[in-house]
Amino acid sequence: MAKRKPKARRTRSPHPGVKMLRRSLPSGAVTWEARWRDPDTRRVVKASLSRLGLGSDEVRRDWAIRKSKALAARAASLAAGGEPRGEPMEIGEAINDYLTRAADRLAPATVYGYRLALAPLAEWCEANGARTLHDLTPGRLAAFRDLSARRRKRAPTAKGRRGERHPSTVPLSPASVNHDLDAVRIFFFEARRLGRLPQLDPEKIAESLSRVRGRLARPAFLRRPEIRKVLEAALRHDGETFALTREEKAGLAPEGSTPRFVPIAPYALFVLLSGCRAGEARGLRWEHVHATGEAPEIILPATLVKTREERSIDLAVSPSLVSLLGALRVRSGGTPFVFGGGASLSREVPEKARLRLVKDYGAPSSSWQRLRQTCATFLNCAPGIYGGGAAFLASKRHGHSVLIAEKRYVGLLRDLPKDATTLEQAMGIEDLAGEIVRRVAGAAPLPEAEEA
């Protein structure tokens, strides 16, 4: 009886569940491909080992063993009751979903800023073959971070359409780059929290999208002569009137009594003396103002504050601010908003007025943020206002940490009068603040002093 041929001994794969296939291309090149079944979707997944840089048999074998162990661990997690991850979400869809949900809890301006910051990410991913969130790796995030650090400012296009811009030769500042990288990190952290980015842990996200180092300049504040120029320009701006309107021609109003612009001096004085952010000033309601009594203050609700923390603004250090709010309340006619009347003041009104002050009325180049920083500088540096507790009390008033006050504001000004106990005295604007309050109250402007 003939002996049967013994069966070939079956060799157990060192990486069960992961197959490695050798492919010969028409060009003669040889590539390697790995295939496995995803435990969550139960679909076959392919990956090119050659594109991953796995050039030797030993390296490919080690990679396949690690992948096999990861698949087995994930399968065991699902068997124990783990939640399936589902289909990978496309990056554009994930960004739109994040912005839609963020609109319910963030300010519109914040959502708009996030949208601008995430647009380059979507474009870069599409150009580099990263279609879904599962295609992202620490290396790809690091490559996007390097690209962001080299981005250029976008300048208005000459003779182009309204709002059209093009990349200029001026690089983005480190602060602008970090602002966009912060938005991208927040997006990825949220995607991981929802289980859409399982291959990246928070440490890898933070490391791959680390902030760009830059030179930190001191706060841009106005000195006493510059503050006076801003307020003087605002008074000249508010004093402009039309030559002759229809009502004036018909005798319904005195000739030359119709203001040409919305008054900006009260708003500028308020931001300067209160240290409010521009958005806080525009959305301020009379119900937030408590300017009577021994401890006058403004209580900003958390919904109005950028940091979402309720804040109190002490008015005792600025008597002119108390007088200004009193005059504005009399003229409000029962409307809810301090600036804007029946609705919050739009962003365009003070911004266009600020540009006019610089271009047409001789004000130094500044911004509403610069007025806020000026207020913080004088509160921290004037010895007669808060004394030894200046850093702490000014920080509470402005809504930032004491560390920021000590590192950024303390000691910037050393020539302030020691007997100045109010902001107006420290800034040297008591006369200008009084004139603004007089005009709000309806009094005629004081005649300007003639130059000698």
Image (cartoon, grey):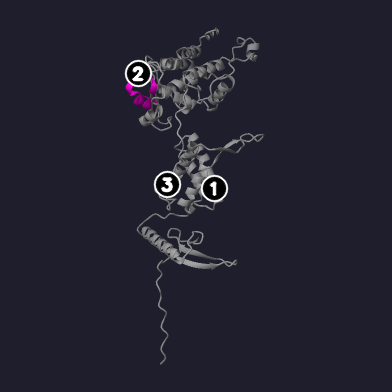
Using the numbered discs, state the Cα–Cα distance from disc 1 to disc 2 in whole angstroms: 55 Å
- Residue 391 magenta: yes
- Mark sitting on residue 207: 3
Using the numbered discs, state the Cα–Cα distance from disc 3 to disc 1 in whole angstroms: 19 Å
How many marks the image carries: the answer is 3
Q: Position of residue 192 (x, y in %)?
A: 42, 48
Q: Residue at x 58, y 37 (%)?
A: 154
Q: Position of residue 413 (x, y in %)?
A: 41, 22
- Residue 84 magenta: no
Q: Amino acid at mark 3?
A: Glu
Q: Amino acid at mark 2?
A: Ala
User: Label 1: which residue?
Assistant: 124
Q: Quadrant of the N terminus?
A: bottom left
Does residue 284 appear in the picture of this structure?
A: no
Quadrant assignment, res 59: bottom left
Q: Amino acid at mark 1?
A: Trp
Quadrant assignment, res 277: top left
Q: Secondary structure at mark 2?
A: loop
User: Label 2: which residue?
Assistant: 295
- Residues shaded magenta: 380-397
